[in-house]
Image: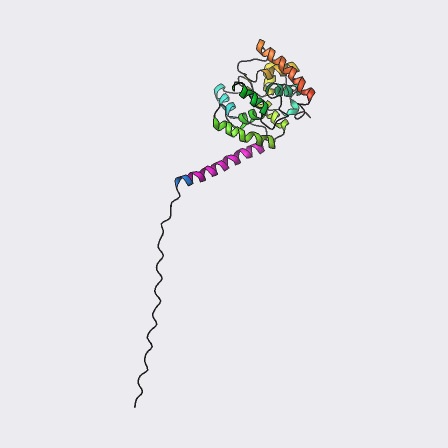
Amino acid sequence: MSKPAPRKKPAAKAPPAAPEPELVAAVPIGWPRRLWRWAVRGTGLVAGFFGALVLIYTVVPVPGDFYMMQERWRLGGLQKDWVPMEEIAPVMARAAVAAEDANFCLHWGFDMAAIRAALAEGGNRGASTISQQVVKNVFLWQGRNWARKAMEGVLTPAVELVWSKRRILEVYLNVAEFGEGVFGVEAAAQHYYGIPAAQLSAQQAARLAAVLPDPKERNPAKPGPVTRRRAAQIQSGAETIAADGRAACFEE
């Protein structure tokens, strides 16, 4: 008797196929996020640019600024000669500080007492320090608007941190406007008195400092009554800051 044929084992069922993953559409980055990224990158680039300039100008003479370029284009040329602090008469440095920022050696870029006094007088009185004027003249532009004031508020402490007070004043005296197309104390001394800045007398220095608020209308070589009175005040103030130590931060 024949044996029955062995039963075949049923074939194993294949496991069910895994479901195909659903394709999720990429969510596009919204404009607000893109604008934020661009703003952050742009701010970083601007900060890096100005930071590099602050470091470079620690030792390199400032070649000029936006206002000088405008005046050069308008007038066809400028009188401008850069000289180191060692070639500027000490009486000129003191006169500029006495005229523009008597507490220059005592603050970190902003004279809070002068700001409070200006606010008390309704904002009709200037309160910009020499440091602020250097930042405006070298790195920014003329005119009053919130953007420039905001950048000035950031750059002024940076300049105070990196530059010495002597360097800040040296740059100021070399970029300040002393007359129509006359920039820097060396060019001013040559233009008005025919001498180098190192040979300026106390009276000549005071008269040069007296024209700084309005250099296109005042002439230190032919001063009117207002300029004479202001120069006398400046000369007295320069002697005062030399005596009370407020010139120590920029004098060797």
Camera-nearest residue between 2 and 222:
2
Residue segment shown in magenta? 34-56
Is residue 111 visible to the viewer in this orientation of the structure? no
68 sits to left or right of 21: right
Residue 11 at what x, y percent from top left?
33, 73
Picture coordinates of residue 168, whole percent (x, y): 60, 27
Tell me the residue at 42%/41% (across/down).
33
Residue at screen point 39% across, 40% down: 31
Q: Quadrant of the C terminus?
A: top right
Provide residue 107's location: percent of width, then percent of height.
61, 27
For residue 194, what is the image quadrant? top right
Q: Is residue 233 visible?
A: yes
Above or below, 12 against 173 in this view is below
Colour pattern of the rendering? rainbow
**Residue drawn at (55%, 34%), measured in percent from left and top?**
51
Residue 177 belongs to magenta span:
no
Q: Is residue 158 left or right of residue 39?
A: right
Asked which quadrant contains residue 58, the reply is: top right
